[in-house]
Amino acid sequence: MSSNKKLMVLAGDGIGPEVMAATLKVADWFARHRSLNFDITEGLVGGAAYDAKGVPLTDETLADAMAADATLFGAVGGPQYDDLPFEVKPERGLLALRKEMDLFANLRPAMVFPALVSSSTLKPEVVSGLNIMIVRELTGGVYFAEPRGRETLADGTVRAFDTNMYTPPEIERIGRVAFDLARKRQGRVVSAEKANVMHSGVLWREVMTALHQAEGDGVTLEHMYADNCAMQLVRAPKQFDVLVTDNLFGDILSDTAAMLTGSLGMLPSASLGAPDETTGKRFALYEPVHGSAPDIAGKGLANPLAELLSFSMMLRYSFDQGDDADLIEQAVEKALSGELRTGDIMADGFTQTGTDGMIDQVINSLDELAR
Ligand code: IPM
Ligand code: MG
């Protein structure tokens, strides 16, 4: 019986397969140097699954992902799929994985690597040393709540609608994740909603406040309207430690936070379910925050570091291999000081490279660090 970790690989569309292939080279490095072996099952998702099977996620692929210890995801989507019916759009494949595995807790760390301070569009003093953990609720809210749809009124007017909806247990469980993470960090949680205009925002604030009173030892909680939060993120981002918010605001605020770090090509994420009460097993999917980047897909130009850092989050959160995760992060930092950089993080004094050049530089750094 092999005790290898079971890894489901879903590379998806656009640059997904390229950054995935690069990341798996690093997985291979760990197999050779650290006896960290994975049994890999590959599957199709998004447009790739639609092209082959007519749906963006098959039941078999979902079952494979559920049977694995963790899923590493690339990206989905592309302009050729824009006109598909809603139910079979590539994004539905990702949303179905999130929903079916109940991956309610999405962790999106926005960290500025010292070597990339000058890549941000913000001033170096505003972003240097930045380290924010965004905790986004991922299985509720406007992404999934019913009613949603489109209808034609009696007078012929078309009306489209979505619903934002949350229950206290949904808010409590994501709040708990934020508090637990904050205890291992600086102990500061900001909760963002629109309690000034939305009923779901009022409830969100009430539940967070009550949870903080009941379970918030060692953590401070501040409430912020989501629009103000967006402004504060670009004005003075270092005021944030952990930022907890709902599905839609989390989608928007995490892209904002991503750009503080210099490039969307650097940001990983972890989407976690609750640990099973008897087995302790928790579903988990790791994916870069960047999308499929159709404009550069297939050209070998994409920055593979967000996918690699997602792999590193997987080692940390699913496999309790914190030392190996640290090693990857150190190797990335070291590689960023090397000669080569991908286009998204190019700067004076560096030579532009592609996906392979970038990952090889990380592997060289791993070799050096492991010596
Ligand atoms: C993200 C993406 C997804 C989302 C899309 C691809 C469905 O933007 O993970 O942030 O909106 O959640
Ligand atoms: Mg997004």
Image (spheres, helix red, strand yellow):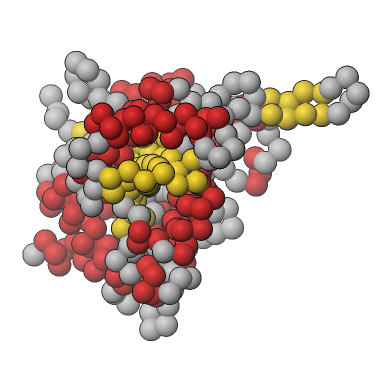
The residue lying at 38 percent from left, 79 percent from top is 350
> Which residue occupies the foreground of this view, 301 or 91?
91
Q: Which residue occupies the extreme left position in the image?
A: 371
Residue 43 horizontal/vertical position (percent)? 42, 33
Figure check: 329 above or below 269: below
Regarding residue 345, the answer to whether it shows in the image is no
Q: Quadrant of residue 41?
A: top left
Q: Is residue 329 left or right of residue 103?
A: left
Regarding residue 148, the answer to whether it shows in the image is yes
The residue lying at 14 percent from left, 30 percent from top is 3
Q: Is residue 175 left or right of residue 121?
A: left
Figure check: 274 above or below 338: above
Q: Is residue 72 left or right of residue 194?
A: left
The residue lying at 47 percent from left, 52 percent from top is 229
How many numbered marks does the figure carry?
A: 0
Residue 215 horizontal/vertical position (percent)? 24, 31
Q: Which residue occupies the extreme right position in the image?
A: 155
The residue lying at 39 percent from left, 29 percent from top is 207
Figure check: 14 above or below 215: below
Residue 247 horizontal/vertical position (percent)? 48, 37
The N terminus: image quadrant:
top left
Residue 120 horizontal/vertical position (percent)? 44, 69
The C terminus: image quadrant:
bottom left
